[in-house]
Image (tube, rainbow, N blue to C red):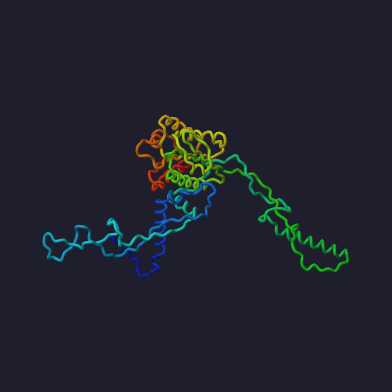
Amino acid sequence: MAIFRDHGENPLEHDRSIEDRRRHRQLVEKSIKENLGDILSEESIIGESKNKKFKIPIRGIKEYQFIYGKNNKGVASGAGGEKRGDKLGSAGEQSGSGTGSAGNQEGEDVYETEITLEELLDYIVEDLDLPNLDRKKYSEIIVESSGRKRGYQRYGINPRLAKKRTVMSKIARKQGKRRALKELGSNTVLERFPFREEDLRYYKVKMKPKKESNAVMIFIMDVSGSMDNSKKFLARSFFFVLSRFIKRKYNNIAFEFISHTTTAKIVSEYEFFHKAESGGTYISSGLYKTLELIKTKYPPSVWNIYPFYASDGDNWSEDNERAIKAVNELCDISNLLGYAELLPSTYSTTMYVRFLKEIKKKNFASVIVKEKKDLWHALKLMLSKELEEEA
């Protein structure tokens, strides 16, 4: 159905640029949702610059217009003198696809637009309709914060340079030299008297202790043979968005990476996403390693704890009960425990089903990503769960 808009004779009644910007934004949002996994699949969780730009492919916008069409197969109009059995319509028409040869139809316009990481996250958060969340706890870790200025000193950093005091120091040195020359009976005129390093004065700032909010994000992943690169890249995109969202809430945040097969170990981010292993899968091994790490390094009384686990859902059946027990124990000491099942096998019942039925903790969130385009919806579910916990 065609849609016609009457914008009136007065061009001021409708700002065409506003409509163009609105449609452009809609296309950007649509492209982000469809390509989020590919956009972020190579990004580093630690040390990423918020000003980095990402290229987003956008399909071109075409204005409404009348075009000449072609009759569908079996539908045609005649001149009135046709007889039964006569064929109507032109033969040999070429279409752009399905003929096995080069088409003659115009393709879609595709162009790229650039957005920064902060803009990308703004799109995500705006779509989620999430407020600025409050921090739940304050750590007992004391950091130094700038306090009041307490006098002057000869050494310091440029932002603390006391310009007025520096000039006064130079003038005092100049007056002292004049007095010395006068006492010696010299008539030398000091025309140029430059600054010296000894003239510089800096503010002395007394640092005061300040409590900072702290969070730790613990990423856990099965790295056995079934977790191929496509699943790991999807996991990276999933973890990346979650880490940036949590970073918006806390001033200080730590990251830990735990990989496992039947046994678990703490690794670097690079090993986490690139090192492939073989062997079976005990999900509980990664979860219990997380519990051990929290106990020794991140006491729940002073840390906001966010463990997130990524897997394709395959697990040895003998380990299922231990995995469920470990999830319940982790929920008891975490702000939010997330489980993401990525590109699961369609031939067996995965852990997502077990967790969904047996884990009743309010701060446990489980999502399933059957294909790349599901990633956006999975992130919405996970972050909305965090919102419920903050409410």
Instruction: Give the image quarter of residue 100.
Output: bottom left
In the rendered image, the residue lying farthest to the front is 101
How far from the left and from the top, in percent, is residue 220?
A: 48, 39
Residue under the point 44% across and 58% down: 113
In the rendered image, the residue lying farthest to the left is 83
Q: Is residue 50 found left or right of 67 in the rendered image? A: right
Q: Camera-side residue: 200 or 148?
A: 200
Question: Taking the image as drawn, is residue 353 in sight?
Answer: yes
Instruction: Give the image quarter of residue 167.
Output: bottom right
Q: Is residue 141 found left or right of 133 in the rendered image? A: right
Which quadrant holds the N terminus?
bottom left
Q: Is residue 152 found left or right of 297 in the rendered image? A: right
Residue under the point 50% across and 35% down: 264
245 is higher (above) or lower (below) than 7: above
How far from the left and from the top, in percent, is residue 19?
A: 39, 62
How far from the left and from the top, in percent, is residue 311?
A: 43, 39
In the rendered image, the residue lying farthest to the bottom is 9
Question: Taking the image as drawn, is residue 290 in sight?
Answer: no
Q: Camera-side residue: 103 or 21?
A: 103
How far from the left and from the top, in percent, is residue 102?
A: 31, 60
